[in-house]
Image (cartoon, helix red, strand yellow):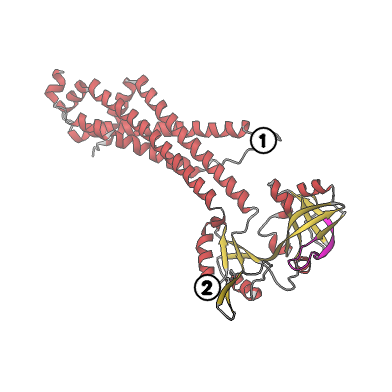
Amino acid sequence: MKTWLPFELIAAFRFLLEGRMQTLLTIVGAAVGVSVIVFMSSLLAGVQANIFSRVLSTQAHIVISPSEEVARPQRTATALQTFAIVQKPAQRLRSIDQWQAIAAQLTARPDIVTVSPAVVGAAFAVRGEVADAVSVTGMEPDAFYRIIALPEKMISGSATLSPNGVLIGIELASDLGIGVGEKLRIRTTSTKTTSGSDQTFIIGGTFDLGNKEVNQRSVFVSLRSAQSLLGLAGGVTSLSVNLIDAYQAEVVATDLRSALGVNAESWIKTFEELFTALKTQSIANYVIQFFVAIAVALGISSVLVVSVVQRSREIGILRAMGASRAQVMRVFLVQGAVIGMLGSLAGSALGAGFVLVWRAFARNPDGTEFFPIALQPSLFVATAVVAALTGLVTAVLPALSAARLDPVDAIRG
């Protein structure tokens, strides 16, 4: 039993080979368009993945903090009138009420992988006559390092914290002229007196979190040391939470706010402006890709339209020999699909080449990559399918035009 496929394929390939230069230029045009889409998609994915990786390497997915204190009205009466005085909440560190119970509830949730209690407060790092304002973070290393991979960011010393040990940023160490094994005095301020708590620590290591300001201000000590230093015995100012899926952070944070009655801020909310900028970047990329695809589609369609005009006589002969309108239409649909598929294959290879060239030459002064760009197989498959479908769809109008040709008129020219 004969099928329609061999005839359409033979006729389609014959038409393509007869106008081989025209066919080649069309395939090259499609390949360039596909390569642009592949390269831009890979580049944008690499940029965004690098940004998210940098953010999440120094930021918990959700941070739980005490609920806000509300200003309380107080009334005082005099002999003549009554005054309403609004008393602002005291500017002091506050612990999360029943934080151990809340931490246990968080740990029991299947979508949460790590909970790390911390005490965070302002202080001064004092070295001789120099005093730099710093942010002291007291934490439990085992839990904290599962959220912030501090051991991987150590420049000198060790991330192991002794009871009187402290870890400081490389910029702070440079400002104070201090190194591993030396003593560092940390002094806090008090809202009630001019003096504050004062403790001396031994520097166990220096780190680089990739941000100069953070490196200048960040100081890490053990949880108990921070509780003692900041006058918050047994309390914590925050609970850092990491999830299985970081991109569900805002949904989980909303649930925690309503369920636990605490402040829960997700990293998505914290970096809302960054997310907005990245979304805008993605939209711009999609718009560019759309117009590139339109240009490729118009190129394929215009070539096939010209092919219909140039081969109207051959089409008329085929129709006179018994070829149906549907068969003639399929001949041009096959041409469009073949051009789209060959263009997608060549374009994918060209796009991969651009990515490899970028990875080889786009380097930091120290020789490392600007950011990693992965060649995702799914991107190539999706691009190939879309390009083939684009070629097929754009061939519809020329195919319809060819199918409608009257055999007699076509042969007469």
- The residue at the point 73 percent across, 48 percent down is 208
Residue 346 image label? none
Badge count? 2
For label 2, the residue is: 259
Q: Nearer the viewer, mark 1 or mark 2?
A: 2
Q: Provide residue 52's location: percent of width, then percent of height.
A: 58, 49
In the drawing, does residue 143 fall left or right of residue 21? right
Residue type indicated by callout 1: Asn
Secondary structure beneath disc 2?
A: helix
Residue farthest to the front, as pictured: 80
In the drawing, does residue 200 fall left or right of residue 133? right
For label 1, the residue is: 364
Q: Provide residue 266's location: percent of width, then percent of height.
A: 56, 60
Residue farthest to the top, as pictured: 413
Residue 7 visible within the image = no
Q: Which residues are the magenta region? A: 187-203
Residue 257 visible within the image = yes
Would you place residue 166 above or below residue 72 in this image? above
Q: Is 198 in the magenta?
A: yes
Name the image quarter holding residue 297: top left
Q: Provide residue 278's location: percent of width, then percent of height.
A: 51, 46
Q: Nearer the viewer, residue 171 or 53?
A: 171
